[in-house]
Image: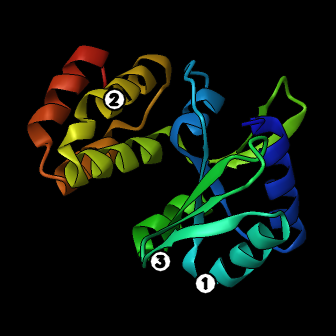
Amino acid sequence: MDLKKALTAIVREFEKNDVGYAIIGGFAIGALGVPRSTIDLDFLVPAEALHKVEAIMLALGYKKVFASENASQYVSPSAEMGEVDFLHAFRPISMKMLAEAETVPVFGKEVRVKVLKAEDIIALKLQSINNNPARLAKDNSDIEELMKSRKLDWKILETYFELFGMGGRFLELREKYGGE
């Protein structure tokens, strides 16, 4: 997948059509300064804009291969444009995440995109672990790398860990990474 080509095309259309978005997943972790390889793009978008998202993705040549209340996935027949996954924001907490996304430069500062804050990416990683325990090793590694490399709001993180019943893990990580 040509991440730069796909990301630039999608973000350009989102901005032109007033679709709120934030990058999440592996690419977002990399955008926040943690070296991370990824083979797809992941976005958080408001559920109320899904009709616009679908129109944009279809116009860019993607085909919808999965859709549920919480997520959708599009795949391009072009290997360059690859696979793009969307989480649908409709709960207050995910809408707050979208509203607080930060604009960061990527691709050597050539492109600027909205990315979730590190604390919110960690929250989504915790949700992923909660939904699929087989993801523990990979997602925990991402969480720890973000904790090592970023100044974080540990009060917000505590709330997220508690939300998923992982208060003990939070205490371990706060002690390990010096959170206050």
In this view, 131 is above or below 111: below
Q: Residue at x 46, y 65 (%)?
A: 94
**How much space separates mark 3 and mark 1, taking CA atoms?**
8 Å
Q: Residue at x 41, y 17 (%)?
A: 148
Quadrant where the image shows the N terminus: top right
Neighbours of disc 3 within 10 Å: few (<14), some (14-19), many (20+)? some
Q: Which residue is mark 1?
A: 48
The answer to whether residue 72 is left or right of residue 163 is right
Element type where label 3 sits in the image: loop
Element type where label 2 sits in the image: helix
Q: Position of residue 176 (x, y in %)?
A: 23, 15
Residue 45 image-quadrant placement = bottom right
Mark seen at residue 138: 2
Q: Do tag 1 and tag 2 residues touch (Cβ < 8 Å)?
A: no
Element type where label 1 sits in the image: helix
In this view of the protein, which residue sits in the foreground, 84 or 98?
84
At label 2, which amino acid type do we have? Lys
Mark seen at residue 90: 3
Q: Do tag 3 and tag 1 residues touch (Cβ < 8 Å)?
A: yes
**How much space separates mark 3 and mark 2, taking CA atoms?**
26 Å
